[in-house]
Amino acid sequence: MPFIKLEAGIIDKEKKEKLISEFTKIASETLGIPQEAFVVLIKENSMDNWGTGGKILSNVLAEREKK
């Protein structure tokens, strides 16, 4: 059973449905495995749980918005 995992920030339900559908479709076509065999997991993370450049991602994004 192929497993696809995406870790990202908070995603609305409609975007999750599209991601799951498209990931499954492309992986199925590429690997020649039926779509029904795939499991897709979307793990959502708060921007406070990510860091880049030694800073919490929520702060980095807030700084970018100010510019």
Image: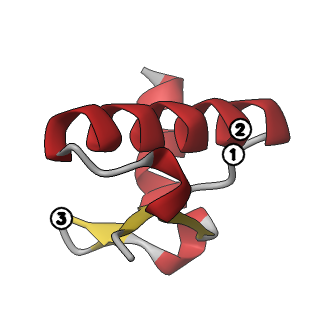
Location of residue 23 in the rendering, given as x and y in whole percent from the top left corner = 42, 40
Mark 3–mark 2 Cα distance, whole angstroms, equals: 32 Å
Mark 1–mark 3 Cα distance, whole angstroms, equals: 23 Å
Disc nearer the start of the sequence (3/2): 2
Amino acid type, residue under disc 2 in the picture: Glu
Nearer to the camera, 65 or 19: 19
Location of residue 25 in the rendering, given as x and y in whole percent from the top left corner = 42, 33
Disc nearer the start of the sequence (1/3): 1
Location of residue 55 in the rendering, given as x and y in whole percent from the top left corner = 33, 70
Helix, strand or loop status at disc 3: loop
Disc nearer the start of the sequence (1/2): 1
Q: Look at the picture and state if 57 lies above or below 22.
A: below
Quadrant of image for the C terminus: top left
Report which residue position mark 2 lands on.
Answer: 17
Residue positioned 79% across, 31% down in the render: 14
**Seen from this angle, which residue lies furthest top?**
67
Q: Residue 53 carries which label?
A: 3
Q: Does the rendering let one see residue 46?
A: yes
Q: Look at the picture and state if 24 lies above or below 38.
A: above
**Seen from this angle, which residue lies furthest right?**
13
Report which residue position mark 1 lands on.
Answer: 11
Residue positioned 39% across, 77% down in the render: 1
Instruction: Give the image quarter of residue 27.
Output: top left
Q: In this view, does 34 lie to the left or right of 21?
A: left
Amino acid type, residue under disc 1 in the picture: Ile
Nearer to the camera, 53 or 24: 24
Q: Pointer 2: residues within 10 angstroms few (<14), some, or many (20+)?
A: few
Q: Pointer 3: residues within 10 angstroms few (<14), some, or many (20+)?
A: few
Q: Answer yes or no: do the residues labelled 1 and 2 have beta carbons within 8 Å?
A: no
Mark 1–mark 2 Cα distance, whole angstroms, equals: 10 Å
Amino acid type, residue under disc 3 in the picture: Gly
